[in-house]
Image (cartoon, grey):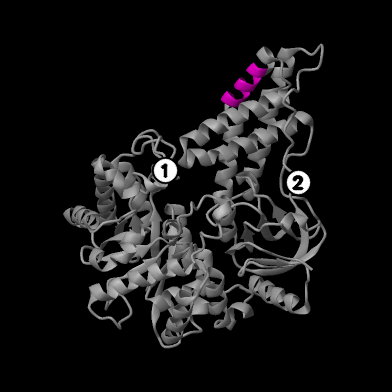
Amino acid sequence: MAQYTGVAVSPGRVVGTVRSMAPPVAEPPANEKLPEGADPSAEAARIPEAAAAVQAALTRLAERASGDGKQILEATAQMAADPSLSQTAQGFVISGGKSPARAVWEAGDQVATMLEGLGGYMAERATDVRDVRARIVAELRGEQAPGIPDAEEPFVLTAVDLAPADTATLDPERVLALITSDGGPQSHTAILARQLGLPAIVAAQGIHDIADGTEVFVDAGFGTITDDVTEEHHRFAAAWSELQKNPLTYEGGGAVLTDGTRVQLLANIGGAADAEKAAAANADGVGLFRTEFLFLDREDEPSVAEQTGAYAEAFAHLPGKKVVVRTIDAGADKPLPFLTEADEPNPALGVRAYRTSWTKRSVLTNQLDAIAAAAKETDAKPWVMAPMIATVDETEDFAALCAERGLSPAGIMVETPSAAITADRHLGACDFVSIGTNDLTQYTMAADRQLGSLAHLNNPWQPAVLSLVKATCDGARAAGGDPDAFGESANKPVGVCGEAAGDPGLAVVLVGLGVNSLSMTPRSLPAVARVLSTVDLAQAKELAAKAVAARTAEEAQHAVRAGLPILGELGL
């Protein structure tokens, strides 16, 4: 009997047989040269042919995919078509006498290393380059490209991590659950698993000791895997399976606790297509409208007119509903050539998000002008908030910019411990706050959220993080004047728009701490609403107090789950 533990990123309980990803493509030997008598030009010509074959294969996969998966595959296919990689590799063959496979390997490494040196978003693309490199090498050798196993029966997939192109082809009809030994809660793998509703655990060390064909029980709510499968485990898995056959629905109107307390349930979106999905899911509005989609992958700032059109298109899907718009969150993992510096030694703690307005004011003011113009064209109710706020001076400055344009309510994101600790003073200067638990966890635990090796620290169940959520809610009550009241009518509103809001158990804790709106991927709305409907506010407060007082994240999670039997009943 063996049990393995990782970081739970998408809940669910399943029993299934393990199938592991094919091992990575082996690196060609460093001294691998052209065979004696081979024509260097002819051998070099094989490289663009192999790249074209890889591009075609990825394009075919993209045609069968949808949503984010389709976009990832299309982007990876474009990378395979980029002539710079092939041309560099061809040069290594013709001038250096290297084999085509070795030449592609070294050329890919050269490009990837350059991207890693740029940091942030560009550094993340290095993984894509190495994925394309491996696929081209496999094509040159006549090997099968790395990818998800093809099996007749559904299976539990184990892997080191998944390349974006592999993640994009995840099929919940074939893959019962996903377990990786690397990766973190904010990786491509984790984000897409949540969107698919696929049970997933990351950073699970030792899982490669599990032989293919082994039956395991995966509890992706707790983050555990065991090969000692019991009848109880089968009952848990059956409950989850039943939930998939007869999924919960959400009719809108907020989650209603047993005592009548109502909590707004909102959706996170990144554009008009997401807004349409949020409306179809009956979300009560939008708690996080990420506006970076307009700014990424371009050399120049979009015009006010272009931004106005994009915002208005999204707003149009949500007439009469609250839409919380986050101003541009550039920097760190989203660098922009016209706004951020590429050579910051620590971009996550650098000039990012609101801070870029210190020197390039017009980018922020142009965006606010566009949001104000879009608001006048539609019936949506936009709220506007600034990310990466640390001081009350910054809050006052942003609120003044919004007031000049008639944008109200105006608020801030609580992502820094400083903003959480002084929330009462921030809320004296603005109308609302929204807690970004992803960054708040990163900064509280001093753990880069992009590093899989720190995934156990980047857990929103950490008592220190929950204590800062409590401090924020306490500040809101102080700013609202009624320390015992709950709800936006009595206090300055506090929302949560990080991934934590979509965890049904954690949602109960957040409400117990005083959060009055939760924003998540639309797929999570029904389960969160159902679990909240089984408790009253007093019970939520009691569970929240246990979580905050816990010694560890694991103890906090176990204490709350013990008080919410509905989670087990639903297989969550």
Labels 1, 2: front one: 1
Furthest residue toward left: 404
Location of residue 253 (image quadrant): bottom left
Element under disc 1:
loop
Q: Is residue 31 left or right of residue 273?
A: right
Q: Nearer the viewer, residue 546 or 529?
A: 546
Q: Position of residue 13 (x, y in %)?
A: 67, 70
Q: Nearer the viewer, residue 110 or 548?
A: 548
- Callout 1, which amino acid? Asn
Instruction: Establish if 361 lies above or below 247.
Output: above
Q: Position of residue 484 (x, y in %)?
A: 30, 83
Residue 566 at least partly seen: yes
Residue 254 at least partly seen: no
Residue drawn where x is 23% and y is 66% of the image? 425
Prevalent SS, magenta region: helix
- Callout 2, which amino acid? Ala
Range shown magenta: 83-92
Give the residue at mark 1. 346
Element under disc 2:
loop
Give the residue at mark 2. 22
